Amino acid sequence: MSAHASAQTSAATSESTVLPADPAVSVVRPGEGETILLGSTRMRVLQDGSNTGHRIGIAESVLAPYTPGPPQHRHARHDEGFYVVSGTVRFTVGEEDHDAAAGTLVMVPRGAPHTFANVTGEQAVMLSTFTPDLYVQYFRDLRDMADGERELTPRTNVDAMSRYATEPAVELVPQPAPGPAPRPAADAL
């Protein structure tokens, strides 16, 4: 068997073992999808992995002005992508800040420390991908904690993250809320 024929056979075999016999197409229209409210962030789950063999999850997040992000963290079992649809989102990777305007894609591979926040006075919208999809359940867990009147603190957030092979990238320190710089006191002028 030639190398070309062997590669074709290998590709066909891997496709047949990965794809279901009759794959279902998923169409999510505006206003559809599971909505998860987390503080001032509204997330709409567009694909939870149930139609993709759990290979990918996709969500749309609407970040209100001055929305702080999660603690900086690393994922051990999934890659995460962010596409900014509107507004500007600040991504912090290690010690570097990247202000991502609409049309920017930020791809975070496994193990890379990161967080994000909306540090502007304008709403921001982004699409997120989770490859594989397991992190979609993390957001459901946070929603369920909030709905159960359990306080969402940095510690409970980290505990929830740990169930999905995610850990803080820095010491657990409360992040200052994003927003305009504080004005000096009148007596300091």
Image (cartoon, rainbow, N blue to C red):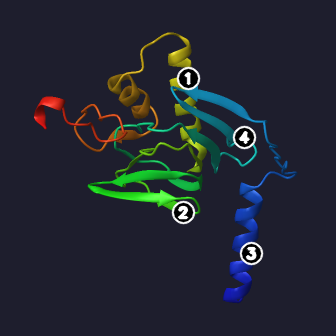
The label nearer to you, 2 versus 1, is 2
Q: Amino acid at mark 1?
A: Arg
- Mark 2, residue position: 104
Q: Indicate whether 149 appears above or below 168.
A: above
Q: Nearer the viewer, residue 85 or 129?
A: 85
Q: Residues within 10 Å of mark 4 (few under 14, many from 20)?
A: few
Please tell me in which quadrant of the rendered image residue 45 appears: top right
- Residue 24 percent location from the top left of the image: 85, 48
Q: In the rendered view of the protein, which quadrant contains the N terminus? A: bottom right
Q: In the rendered view of the protein, which quadrant contains the C terminus? A: top left
Determine the residue located farthest toward the left in the rendered image.
Answer: 188
Secondary structure found at label 3: helix
- Dot placed on the residue nearer the N-terminal end, 2 or 1: 2
Q: Amino acid at mark 2?
A: Thr
Given contact means CB atoms under 8 Å apart, are the residues at marks 3 and 4 in contact?
no
Q: Amino acid at mark 3?
A: Thr
Secondary structure found at label 2: loop
- Dot placed on the residue nearer the N-terminal end, 3 or 4: 3
Q: Which numbered dot is residue 84?
A: none
- Residue 5 percent location from the top left of the image: 74, 84
The label nearer to you, 3 versus 4, is 4
- Dot placed on the residue nearer the N-terminal end, 3 or 2: 3
Q: Does residue 108 appear in the picture of this structure?
A: no
Given contact means CB atoms under 8 Å apart, are the residues at marks 1 and 4 in contact?
no
Secondary structure found at label 1: helix
- Mark 1, residue position: 143
- Dot placed on the residue nearer the N-terminal end, 2 or 4: 4
Q: CA distance from mark 3 to mark 2?
A: 38 Å
Q: Which numbered dot is residue 9?
A: 3
- Dot placed on the residue nearer the N-terminal end, 1 or 4: 4
- Mark 4, residue position: 50
Q: Amino acid at mark 4?
A: Ser
